[in-house]
Amino acid sequence: MKLEVNVIGAGLAGAEASNFLANKGVIVNLYEKRPKVKSEAHITDKFAELVCSNSLKNKKLDNACGLLKEEIRKMGSLIMESAQQSEVPGGDSLCVDRDKFADYITKKIKNNKNIIIHEEEVNKIPDGITIICTGPLTTKNLLDEISNISREKCYSFFDASAPIILKDSIDLNKVYFKSRYNHEDDSYIDCPMNKMEYEKFVSELLNAKKAVLHEFDTNYFEGCLPVEVIASRGVETLRYGPLKPVGLEHDGIMPYAVVQLRQDNLIGDLYNMVGFQTNLTYGEQKRVFGLIPGLEHAEFVRYGLMHRNSYLYAPKVLDEELRLKNDPNIYIGGQLSGVEGYVESAATGLLAAYYCYMNLQHINHKTLSYNSVLGALVRYISHTGAINFQPMNANFGIIYRANVLPKETVEANALKGIDDFLKQINE
């Protein structure tokens, strides 16, 4: 008899988990509520849709997220495979055409004979081995069931996405093309602002009407704050954040502030506003962002929006193999596990599938080395002693002695940790 596993959710983590297990000969029952049930954040019905941004962050190995990408690439990551096919210019960042990225993954999943797709909303965890990758928009019923099993309540914060603009609607006479710190591809459109323009923009931004959030808990994630929340922390805050002009001189002049637009698709006709996650109403987005030089007549193909991000209190409920401590037949992958970020979400979905397969096959194994970014990330979320646990991004601060060792040594140790882990499954 073939082994069988349930995977709930066809986002980044669910796609990774399903793809790995199916390629190992496991029958995967993949449950995805879209398109039958609409999502408050998704636009399409494709698997692994990128909601907030088209950037998978830094791709250099001396950056923790860049190193994490190389780790999961070694592990056979589907999103890394897709990103290679759909990459668009982005300087040091790995940026992709959202539609082509999701198309590639959707076709891979749908064409895999070992994956059975169930288009339905799951409100009760099915019998058998199950990997839950329902992400930040997990339904209340499913969250309640997880809480009942784990005996710990689930938490949430609010996240936001940035607007996307049609390139032809940008006044190119008022902007210039340049990547920060003189990267060769000049892949960003830069909208320079003088002091008067900047101060008027901030004033209007702070007084703009916001969309109503229906949930009572309005905590924000510090790594992805709405632009209006950043501005509320001081008039100059944006100039030291997403609008910093450093490295963006033009014709020998340093602007007072710069709004950057990043290419969002392969054709190059769509650009997103970097760092402009927002909860302003659509009308106010058009009015206030129209004060930015070059965007006076901008046409928005997608406005920014906010959505709830749910997550588990991982240190209390998850073990080192991403299983619920109270039910080892249930694995948790993706943002629900307590990580934050596209790559981190995909990586935990993939790792959960590895552990699931090893346990199904009764393979004697050790957990992934803490010297790797992924191993350290899972170690952090499952063991941190923080009283107020918050979701965690990939960073070198969670790797033992990464602050004192040469970066080359940290990289080598991380990749060796991945190689050693993979040997266990390939022997």
Image (tube, grey):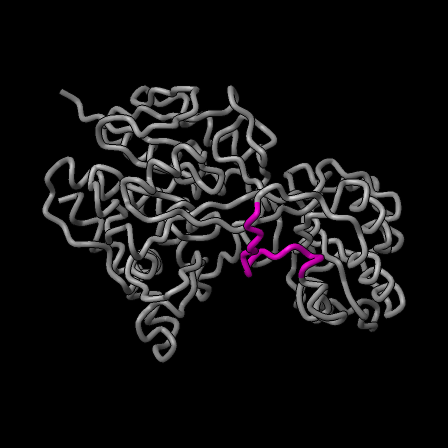
Queried whether the magenta region covers residue 225, the answer comes back as: yes
Outermost residue, front direction? 216
Region in magenta: 216-229
Residue 189: say if magenta: no
In which quadrant is the C terminus drawn?
A: top left
Q: Quadrant of residue 233?
A: bottom right
Coordinates of residue 260 in the picture (x, y in percent): 72, 56
Which quarter of the rendered picture does the N terminus lie within? top left
Indicate left or right for 240 with 113 as reference: right
In the displayed structure, 361 sits above or below 408; it is above
x 78%, y 42%: residue: 167
Give the residue displayed 33% in from the left and 39% down from the top: 146
Task: From the viewer's perspective, tell me whether residue 230 is left or right of residue 218.
Answer: right
Q: How many marks?
A: 0
In the image, what residue occupies the spot 17% across and 41% down? 358
Q: Residue drawn at (21%, 52%), measured in percent from left and top? A: 421
Image spot of residue 418 (x, y percent): 27, 55
In front here: 266 or 156?
156
- On the image, the x and y values in percent for residue 175 come to 83, 56
Q: Is residue 92 above or below residue 116?
A: below
Quadrant for residue 145, please give it.
top left
Can residue 183 be seen in this snapshot?
Answer: yes
User: Which residue is at the front of the view, 296 or 278?
Assistant: 278
Task: Give x and y (percent) for residue 19.
Answer: 34, 32
Instruction: Please say whether residue 347 is visible from this viewpoint.
Output: no
Left or right side of 392 for 54: right
Is 61 drawn above or below residue 363 in the view shown? below
Seen as rendered, the residue at the extreme bottom is 404
